[in-house]
Amino acid sequence: RHGNEIKKATWMECSMSKASRRLIGGLELIGGVGGLFILANQLPGFRLDVYVIILAPIAIGIFLLSLVAGVLLWRDHRAGRVVSIIVQTIQLPKLVSPLVIFLFSFGLDFYPYVQITGGDVSKVGVDFKLAPFYNLYLNLPGTPLAVGISIPAIVFLIVLLRGKSGGVQEKPMPPPPPTDSEWERQ
């Protein structure tokens, strides 16, 4: 019974609720598993070149990191919050350019973006992803410049940065019971 009281006290002291921890962790878990599944289906169809050799391990590593972050955060492990901050930071920027395309989404994402073609704003929009998604490419001449930022990643980062690290944290021991002489004085 005392152990349950410690857990309840820990959740009351923690600014990151169980629901928000489970939501973020669940989406990261879905993003990791789904992203690895997508890569497993796509990689055999790619032509093996230097870009695939460089980028495939990066994409695999990012989705593995999302999977690990989701499991750790879901289980309220101390490292879960830190790894989730890294994963949400990866999801935050949306960049499309002739040199690099970098977009990762883990389970749920929507982001406003601006596209620039020929030095002028050619498109402003909002994109929505309801599943793991990625675009990771290098050196694609002729690609217009577009930049965006993930709204869920901003919200999740705020929640994660404000929350205390997870794990059951015991409170300090209560004072010892009164001694016989203290009882006699009362």
Image: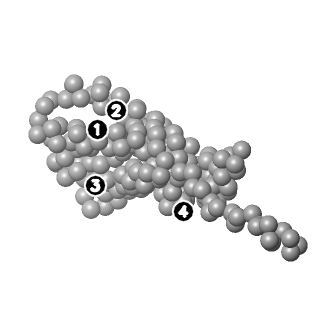
Quarter of the rendering containing residue 15: bottom right
**Residue 36: mark:** 2
Specify which label sits upstream in the sequence, 2 or 3. Answer: 2
Q: Residue furthest bottom?
A: 185
Specify which label sits upstream in the sequence, 4 or 1. Answer: 1
Residue highlighted by disc 3: 145
Q: Which quarter of the rendered picture does the N terminus lie within?
A: top right
Residue at x 22% of width, y 24% of height:
44
Q: Amino acid at mark 3?
A: Leu
Residue highlighted by disc 1: 60
Residue 30 seen in the figure = yes
Say which of marks 2 and 3 sits in front: 2
Q: Position of residue 89 (x, y in %)?
A: 39, 55
Q: Amino acid at mark 2?
A: Leu
Residue at x 88% of width, y 73% of height:
186
Task: Kindly check if marks 2 and 1 are in contact, taking CB atoms under 8 A apart as contact.
Answer: yes
Q: Residue furthest right?
A: 186
Specify which label sits upstream in the sequence, 4 or 2. Answer: 2
Residue highlighted by disc 4: 162
Q: Nearer the viewer, residue 18 or 1?
A: 1
C-alpha span from label 4 to label 1: 29 Å
C-alpha span from label 2 to label 1: 6 Å
